[in-house]
Image (cartoon, grey):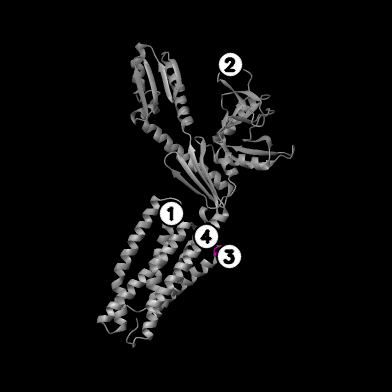
Amino acid sequence: MLYFSKLRLISVTIVSIFFIFISFSNIFNFENNFLNKKINLGLDLQGGSYLLLEIDNDPVIEQKLQNLTVTIRNHFKKKDIRIKDLKLSDQKLSFSVDQKFKQIVLDDFNSKESDFNPYYQRFKSHQLDILDEGNYFTVNYSRQGIVEIKTSSQDQALEIVRRRIDEIGTNEPNILKRGNDRILVELPGLDDPMRIKSLLGKTANLTFRFVTNNENDSFGTEKLEHEDSEEESMVSKRIILSGENLLDAQPRMDNETNETVVSFTLDRVGAKRFGKATSTGIGKQLAIVLDGKIISAPVIRDTIASGSGQISGGFTFQSATDLALLLRSGALPAPLNIIEERTVGPDLGQDSIEAGVIALIIGFILVILFIFVKYKIFGLITNVALIINLFLLVGILTLFEATLTLPGIAGIILTVGMAVDANVLIFERIKEELKNEKNNLIAFDSGYTKSKTAILDANITTLLAAIILFFMGSGPIKGFSLTLATGIFTTLFSVYFIARLLTVLYVLKNKEKERLI
């Protein structure tokens, strides 16, 4: 029907003005926080850093098999079964037993009632393989088990990488999975990635252990280097505390020594362990070990039962801030290696913006001229609706503070073409109706009604493609699909509300003319 109620007229006007006003916040600064929103520019438009990280899962597999080694040794020791030649090499655990104990060993590995219950479940699900040759056994992770380890490590690493980057306050980072052992990090606006690389390259595995001179320590000992020197200290392998017991860590200035330190707070379990260790270890050195290096080794002067302490080590405020950030975000499950990095300069991004804007302007002008020459006054109406359509699209993207990439600009340009296509379908249908219908009102109403199916079909299929691209694609592809999908809704709104409203006003005023189009 060529009829717009006052309520619909007011609603269309308010919606259009609102989004046009919102879109202007990209040019002007408003004091109101709700209105002071802007479209963020992606990596390809404003420059920034691109890092592709690969997770080294070998230490994780080694550690899990090492834990199984301890379990095997303790389990069969209780049964007075001697395990011989127990060793871990090339991600395989091997050992031998006397021939008379072979069946007992096999039964224990395959029994969910034994100490191997957690490992039994892994054998049952084929995460672990066991091979017996005579009285010699080999245990290793199966292909399925390694895939599951990689997937788990990637999920954990992704979350911790996101925490570390969010702590720095980087604008609109893009952090995505790649395969089952890689993570892509895009940081728009960051042209110096050194600090990020330093933070992401540290596993941040924190432990507290006693310094010892006793090489016969029952827990075993190892020599570790000091981070700030080439000195080495012998430390016990017994872990008193780990980073898992930390609740918080913050950099601050020590008023007594006037140096920068990292203060930390422990959870209830950690506070209890720390209090017990410091009460029995007065006079001993407590090594604070980060990623296999001693960053501090203070002497315990008194019992610390408060559940809080501090780490000193000649930090600058920046290094103390970064260490606190690493401790708060947690340890990575496995080391990360940077296998690819790129830096896009702001000049290249500016060139992309200018090229995209020029393409949009040229295409827009050509479309406007063609439509105006082809349909005269209705071409002018289409052009007005097209301009409002662009404002609506930019306004919606601004409202949600979306990130605009170069493919996103391509999506906007495509939206212009789709909006024109819808109007062309309508006007051509109206021309067909006017051949058989002399009443302009009926012809125009039929033109809008009968062209609706074709327009909706075209836009719905495009919308489905955009949805598939959004969920299956990543990065710039998502930006393109999001812009395209938003453009479909603004196009339908501008065609069936704005352009139709203006058309109705003109047709009603000139309904007696013989030829309107």
The answer to whether residue 254 is left or right of residue 168 is right
Q: Residues within 10 Å of mark 1 (few under 14, many from 20)?
A: many
- The residue carrying pointer 2 sits among few (fewer than 14), some (14 to 19) or many (20 or more) residues within 10 Å by Cα, namely few
Going by the numbered disc 2, the residue's amino acid type is Asn
Q: Position of residue 206 (x, y in %)?
A: 57, 33
Q: Which mark is residue 282?
A: none
What residue is at 61 percent from the left and 26 percent from the top? 224
Separation (CA) of disc 1 from disc 3:
30 Å
The residue carrying mark 4 is 353
- The mark nearer the N terminus, 2 or 1, is 2
Residue 388 image offset from top left, x and y in percent: 46, 71
Tell which circle, 3 or 4, labels the residue nearer the N-terminal end: 3
Q: Compute the Cα span from label 3 to label 4.
A: 28 Å
Q: Which residue is mark 1?
A: 478
Q: Is residue 291 above or below residue 477?
A: above
Q: Nearer the viewer, residue 230 or 254?
A: 230
Numbered disc 4: secondary structure: helix
Magenta stretch in the rendered image: 26-34
Disc nearer the start of the sequence (2/4) = 2
Instruction: Look at the image and tell me whether residue 154 can be seen.
Output: yes
Label 4 CA crowd tier, 10 Å (few <14, some 14–19, many 20+): some
Which amino acid, mark 3? Asn
Q: Which residue is mark 2?
A: 216
What secondary structure is marked by label 1?
helix
**Comes first in the chain, label 1 or label 4:** 4
Residue 222 percent across, percent down from the top left: 58, 22
Q: Are marks 2 and 4 in contact (CB under 8 Å)?
A: no
Q: Which quadrant: the C terminus?
A: bottom left
Residue receiving disc 3: 32
The residue type indicated by label 1 comes to: Lys
**Earlier-in-chain disc, 1 versus 3:** 3
User: Can residue 5 be seen from the camera position used here?
Assistant: no
